[in-house]
Amino acid sequence: MMLAQELPRLLYGKPGTPLTFGQYQSTFATSYKAASLLDELEASGLTGRGGAAFPTARKARLLREQRSHNKVVVVNAMEGEPVSYKDSTLLSTNPHLVLDGAAILASIIGAKDVIVCVSRDNPNAVGNVQRALDERARAGARGPQFKLETAPWRYVAGEESALVHWLNDNESLPQYRPQRPSILKIRHHAVLLDNVETCANVALIGRFGAAWFRTLGTKVSPGSVLVTVTGAVERPKVLEVVPSMTLRTILNFADADPDPQALLLGGYGGSWLDAAHLDTPYDNESLAQWGATVGAGIIVVLGRDGCGVVETQRVVKWMANESARQCGPCAFGLPALSDDLAKVGEGSPNSAQALQQLEHRCGVIDGRGACRHPDGVVRFVRSALRVFAGDFQSHARGAPCGASHSGKYFVAVPRLEKERELVWE
Amino acid sequence: MGVRRRTGVFYLRVNPILCDGFGHCHELAPELVTMDEWGYPIIKREPTPLSDLAALESARYAVRGCPRQALRIERVSEN
């Protein structure tokens, strides 16, 4: 039986050895009977953990009000961010918590099917989910019909409309949604799509109640969040933290460089944060004053011997390659941003002009794609221009910093192998 | 031929996936659409009043003239 107010909630157990269904049921024994699960979810104030932090209860209520013969719950474990490991860590610790949360969401909206989407490039996570589903079937657990789908890994393939598009037509391309909030559909069935971590939190709320859930965290962002810390750390780590903790505490837990230059928060569509703000609590309301968000729960630590301009350029180059090339502003704009950054970074004679052009192009691209991919890149570049303003100026003057030639990088970027030949399934 | 509403506003919206940058909308509705350096439309984000009949007319021309049928007019009535 789990103790209340203890920190490892989601990561209860040992990463790498998933709890079996029997162990799971004895560990997370239900201690609370909610009158209405949806009201309980609303009272808990849980927000989505996939990056956008949309209130989960509002989304569930919207789907519940839909008239549809059959509804589907989709669990998103695609983990598109290349430096994020939180979803696969959760699946390798407590896969049944995720499946249980999906079953609760299905009962709230009246869905008969649950589809768990895992990237096929992550065989461990696929195996863990498959084993958990088999255990559930063998134990004869009641609830919705579960299905495992393995989508190809791409940055934008984890975006909700791209994932639903893949489930429909085997094309992981984002779709255009003129109205928001929009209801995504698989054939004619309305879809509720939630991140793995959100589902696990839903399961905890269903089992222990909203009051228990709110014992940790702040009023606006209750509960605990998973965060991946990489960069200038001994080795990448997934931690479960409380949003009221400061960034400095989290870095201490992760054995990170205690005196970094800057932090990258929220992933590659996130933003840089100057190291002067390390005493900010790790929640969206406190980070908003510095223009940052928790996002997908990623902290990349940039050490003092790194160059922010070069790191930004590498990430933007990779993100430009990951564009689905459906919308003109994204397909042409992101490579242009990457080229501008490269010109600024190498400190060539026309760097100053490239810097001006970069600022102008950010304004042109913003908000003109079908999905939020270009907006994320623009936000990332703008935050870099803000945080590394001095570095950008000295690069543009033709005096790049010493760190930019050291060849030492903190932000891991997957290798661009077949840069020109993208295969979209 | 319905009743012409004169209150409220409209937005010209583009589906960026369908849009291939033909540029006809810029020719047909220059007051609403400018172009970026790659030839894709940058559409005015502020609402235009429906009472601005000339702008509404050119927005209609742009919608009908789009070879990819990527444009549409979104009317928002006040109240």
Image (tube, grey):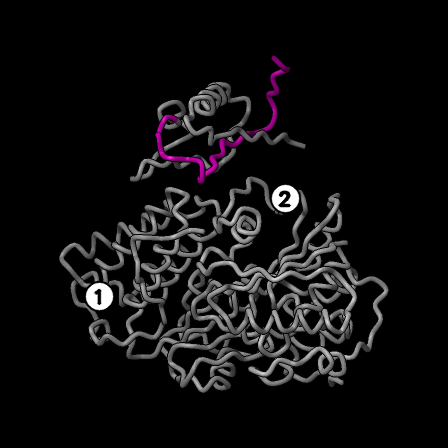
- Where is the N terminus of chain A found, in terms of image quarters? bottom right
Q: Which residues are magenta?
A: B1-24
Where residue A370 appears, as percent x and y from the top left, is: 48, 45
- Magenta run includes residue A344: no
Which label sits on residue A394? 1
Chain of the residue under the numbered disc 1 shown in the image: A
Where residue B55 appears, as percent x and y from the top left, is: 46, 23
Q: Residues within 10 Å of mark 1 (few under 14, many from 20)?
A: some
Most frequent secondary structure within the magenta stretch: loop
Q: Classify residue A367 as left or right of residue A402.
A: right
Residue in the foreground of this view, choosing between A420 and A138? A138
Observer able to see residue A258: no
Residue drawn at (56%, 65%) of the image: A77
The residue type indicated by label 1 comes to Ser
Residue drawn at (13%, 57%) of the image: A349
Residue in the foreground of this view, choosing between A144 and A156? A144
Task: State if disc 1 and disc 2 touch (CB < 8 Å).
Answer: no
Can marks 2 and 1 be said to lie on one chain?
yes
Q: Classify residue A411 as left or right of residue A294.
A: left
Question: In this rendering, is residue A9 above or below A351?
Answer: below
Chain of the residue under the numbered disc 2 shown in the image: A
SS for callout 2: loop
Q: Residue furthest left?
A: A349
Which label sits on residue A187? 2
